[in-house]
Image (cartoon, rainbow, N blue to C red):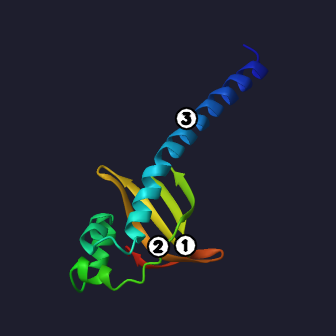
Amino acid sequence: MSKRKRHVMVAAGLGAAFLALAGCASASQPDVSRTAATFENRSVDAQTRCALLAPATLSSVAQSSPCEEEIAHLPLQGGPVRSVQVWGGNAQVKLGSDTVFLTQTDTGWKVTAALCQSRGEAPYDCQVDAP
């Protein structure tokens, strides 16, 4: 087989793999979007919001008092979903003036950080996150 033919076959294989991953990401977008919007929805009770947190984030939020008490005091913004980006098992959702980060777990998508504001090239500044 010629070198040129091998490169074409490799490129075709990589293209197919990329499309498969893109398809998985786009298939996850409704679940990611729904989880972030539910977490940010002001009419959702604190217990439901706490259940949407990833384990490390839940532990961080509930360090000084129960999660439900801490979550009730957060100034969650809510608002319509403006964009969703999914990278494998991680995602970012921008809604209203807030950004929410999520991870995929065995029990579905969970919030790893919320109330996040962009700081340009620096990492986001999040009020809810794991250490």
- Crowding at mark 2 (Cα within 10 Å: few <14, some 14-19, many 20+): many
Give me the C-alpha separation between circle 2 and circle 3. Answer: 32 Å
Please determine whether, in this image, residue 14 is positioned above or below residue 120.
Answer: above
In the image, 10 versus 46, the foreground residue is 46
In the image, 3 versus 77, the foreground residue is 77
- Does residue 88 appear in this view? no
In this figure, which residue is indicated by the disc labeled 2?
Answer: 78
- Crowding at mark 3 (Cα within 10 Å: few <14, some 14-19, many 20+): few
Instruction: Tell me residue 130's x, y (percent).
Output: 37, 73
Badges 2 and 3: C-beta atoms under 8 Å apart? no
Badges 2 and 1: C-beta atoms under 8 Å apart? yes
In this figure, which residue is indicated by the disc labeled 1?
Answer: 96
Q: In the rendered image, which quarter is residue 21 located in?
A: top right
Q: Name the side, left or right, on which 2 lies relative to 85.
A: right
Please determine whether, in this image, residue 57 is positioned above or below residue 70.
Answer: above
Q: Name the side, left or right, on which 32 lies relative to 82.
A: left
Helix, strand or loop at label 1? It is loop
**Residue at 33 percent of width and 86 percent of height:** 73
